[in-house]
Amino acid sequence: MSGMTLTFRGDAGTIADMSALLPERLAGLTAEDVAGLPLPCGGEVVTVGRMFEVSAGDAAEGLLIRPGQAVLDRVGAGMASGRILVEGDAGSHAGAGMSGGLLRIAGNARESLGGALPGLPLGMRGGLISVGGSAGDRAAERMRRGIIVVDGPVGAYAAGFMVAGTLAAGGGCGPHPGFGMRRGTLLLGNAQGKTPEGFADGGTRDWLFLHLLRRALEGTGSWFERMGNTRAHRFVGDLAEGGHGEILSMV
Amino acid sequence: MAEMRINGVRIEDTFAEAFPMTYTRLVITADTPAWVEAATSSLTGFATSVIGCGCEAAVERLLTPEETPDSRPGAAVLIFGMSTGDLAKLVVNRVGQCIMTSPGSACYAGLLQGTKRIPLGGGLRYFGDGHQISKKFGDRRFWRLPVMDGEFVCEDSVAVAKGIGGGNFLILAASHRQCLAAAEAAVAAIRPLPGVILPFPGGVVRSGSKVGSKYKALIASTNTRFCPTLRAVEPETLLAQDVEAVLELVLDGIDETAIRIGMRAGIAAATAGGTAAGVLAVTAGNYGGKLGPHHFHLHEVMA
């Protein structure tokens, strides 16, 4: 990445709110400018430069974050455009409320990946999130549009209250998937032992639109891009919300 | 201008007169090439001339699975109309009746940038009776409509752009058989070219028309000046005594370059056998420059 790099240099376990450090906001700023920006961190506000080593470069070309042992919450939250690459793990609410751009997390993400920020009605509204590891509970909660692809498993209540969009979890999911789901797609890389609660068995077939999803994921190196199959078992639900959503379980 | 001959075939010093049209490109896919052909032949059926059909359409080229959005065999189809409004009605009707009905088919936008957009799945989605599903991947929205063999996947909309209709040339030959052979050679040369279609049956027109008629109800009638059987009674005949048959190729293209390249390839193929193959002359149809702004002078095209 030829853009700007933020390398964490604080203490292990430090928690920081990264929602202000978005490519579109940092575009055109120098490393000194960025280093002087305020950063909510561990109950106080410090400067970015105190916690991160900031490299020269333009964030408009991309933002590379090296979190080390820090817990970086809200990475890419609210992002509308640009690219963020996290070389490591992300904290909670990564990509929450995101409306565009690309967020690539090489490691794991904690809860509410692509979900809704507290107090807001909708989660992710556009763009692409790609996670190389696993994700925590409530991934894609209240998601409205866009794609989230997680190579590993996601936690409980995946795609809960989803309005539309696609969450693809290669390693399956925890309990209560699609709880309150209105529309949208939860794609799981493994077979489901039983019909998820609130869903009806819709049978197994090849799904043409999954070819389109695969094309959309080209270049991410994600599990679904690598998988040649488009045959999946469909569960329709949440029936309590009209039954227009779906859980697709690859077979 | 000096006389031009190619392999002895006279190239008349005249021009083809073409006019602006609005076009779009669809990508049709299916499980097999045979079902692509079934879907596209239906889609492009009865689409030879805007005069009687409302639009002009044909397969631009076949696509390999690597070239299509869903990695299946497909075809690119060009559809030309006189206006965006006309095209919007015709395209959604044709896709609804000819593609959605064809087993295993899907329909995508083959033109993503243009002057405006017209609906595809956006107009057909209501057929899903509330069970239709929208998926937006990147900047492109698709509709999944439940149908009896699974789902019909159709892109939400497609762009339209300004194109050109009515590029043409006529082959004058010593016999009908030789005229047809030359026309077939021209069609074979033009069909592989991108951005240009031959909307008439087999790519060839045998009933060229002129503007107007002795009958008030008709806006066009047979082109008497090129009818061999009327040579003795048509004072303005353009046919010499040795011409037994005339066939015309009409080209619609996405721009002037596409038509120019198509005409050049077609005329070169038609004249390849020379006068020995019975081809006597190549000319073109025009209306004195009053019909359209695009003039393709044969001598310039073949220079």
Image (tube, coloured by chain):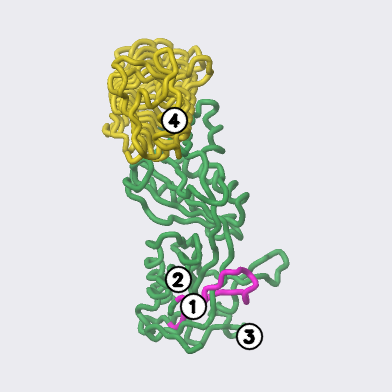
Chain colours: A yellow, B green
Counting from the top left corner in percent of width and height, residue B229 is at: 55, 79
The magenta segment is B280-301
Residue A235 sits in quarter: top left
Give the foreground label among 4 and 1.
Answer: 4
Q: Which residue is mark 2?
A: B263
Counting from the top left corner in percent of width and height, residue B15 is at: 54, 77
Q: Which residue is mark 4?
A: A22
Counting from the top left corner in percent of width and height, residue B22 is at: 57, 56
Q: Which residue is mark 3?
A: B235
Residue A216 sits in quarter: top left
Q: Quick check: B20 above or below A185?
A: below
Q: Along the horizontal axis of the image, is B279 left or right of B208?
A: left
Work out whether disc 1 and disc 2 sit on a shared chain.
Answer: yes
Cα distance, mark 3 to mark 2?
29 Å
In which quadrant will I find the N terminus of chain A? top left
Work out whether disc 3 and disc 2 sit on a shared chain.
Answer: yes
Label 2 secondary element: helix
Task: Kindly tell me whether residue A204 is visible in this rendering.
Answer: no
Label 4 secondary element: loop
Q: Of residues B228 and A222, which is closer to you in this image?
A: A222
Cα distance, mark 1 to mark 2?
9 Å
> Does the stretch in magenta take in A98?
no
Cα distance, mark 4 to mark 1?
59 Å
The chain holding disc 4 is: A
- Residue kind at label 1, given as amino acid type: Leu
Q: Which residue is mark 1?
A: B298
Question: Any mark on residue B40, and which?
Answer: none
Q: Of residues A133 and A174, which is closer to you in this image?
A: A133
Q: Tell me the residue at 42%/20% (across/down).
A: A46
N-term-proximal mark, 3 vs 2: 3
The chain holding disc 3 is: B
Q: Residues within 10 Å of mark 4 (few under 14, many from 20)?
A: many
